[in-house]
Image (tube, grey):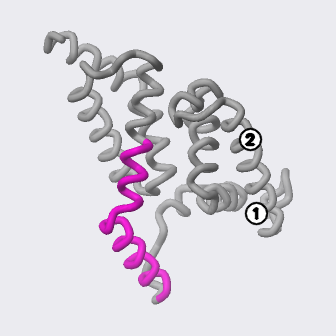
Amino acid sequence: MMKEHKDACLSNAMALYGDYLVRVCYTYVQDWAIAEDMVQDTFVKYYEKMEQFREQSSVKTYLYRIALNNCHSYLASWRYKKLQVIDYWHKLIGHAVDPVHKVIASESDVMLVLAIEKLPTKYKDVLLLYHFAELSLKEVSETLKMPENTVKTRLRRARQMIGVTLLEEGFEYGSDS
């Protein structure tokens, strides 16, 4: 593949999917700078492996798969776990200010985000790809390499789990309290 063609494909992919990928990665890592790093790594891997892409799925699906793998690797890393321990310690001693919660305006949004964060990874993946990355059921199925019916089942269970969590937290639909 010619360098000019690879560069054009990369530029096109970055323009089309960059913002979506950053949002998806952010939902996993909860830090905009790290999410942007994950997306940058995603595009570097895409560029390096472009010749191996067999077009059995869309470029969008391929990029989301790379981004998800990057996020999962990061969340399993010692660096992330060390940051979590430090953050937890700061919260315990009362010095931490969570900027995410400053940005999110309403209490119900905070509750929803927290409910999504509590989901097991297999449910969170499906929910985030479908609702936040706006992939179709077929694209989610291709991205996660699982049957479409499994995607539907996990999506339904994720929604149910969020509903239960919100009810336990005292959330009432249509109310900010």
Q: Secondary structure at mark 1?
A: helix
Query: Between marks 1 and 2, how big is the CA–CA gap?
Result: 18 Å
Q: Which residues are magenta?
A: 68-92
Mark 2 sits on what residue? 153
**Is residue 82 a member of the stretch shown in magenta?**
yes
Instruction: Tell me, for residue 165, which label it has, or none.
Output: 1
Across and down, in percent, residue 89 comes to 43, 84
Across and down, in percent, residue 30 comes to 46, 57
- The relative height of residue 95 versus residue 18 in the rendered view (above or below) is below
Q: Quadrant of residue 101?
A: bottom right
Q: Main secondary structure of the magenta part?
A: helix
Name the kind of residue labelled 1 in the image. Answer: Thr
Pick whichever of labels 1 and 2 is earlier in the sequence. Answer: 2
The residue at the point 53 percent across, 37 percent down is 144
Q: Please give left or right for residue 80 compared with residue 26 in the image.
A: left
Instruction: Tell me, for residue 71, which label it has, or none.
Output: none
Q: Secondary structure at mark 2?
A: helix
Q: Please give left or right for residue 32 compared with residue 98 in the image.
A: left
The residue at the point 26 percent across, 34 percent down is 45
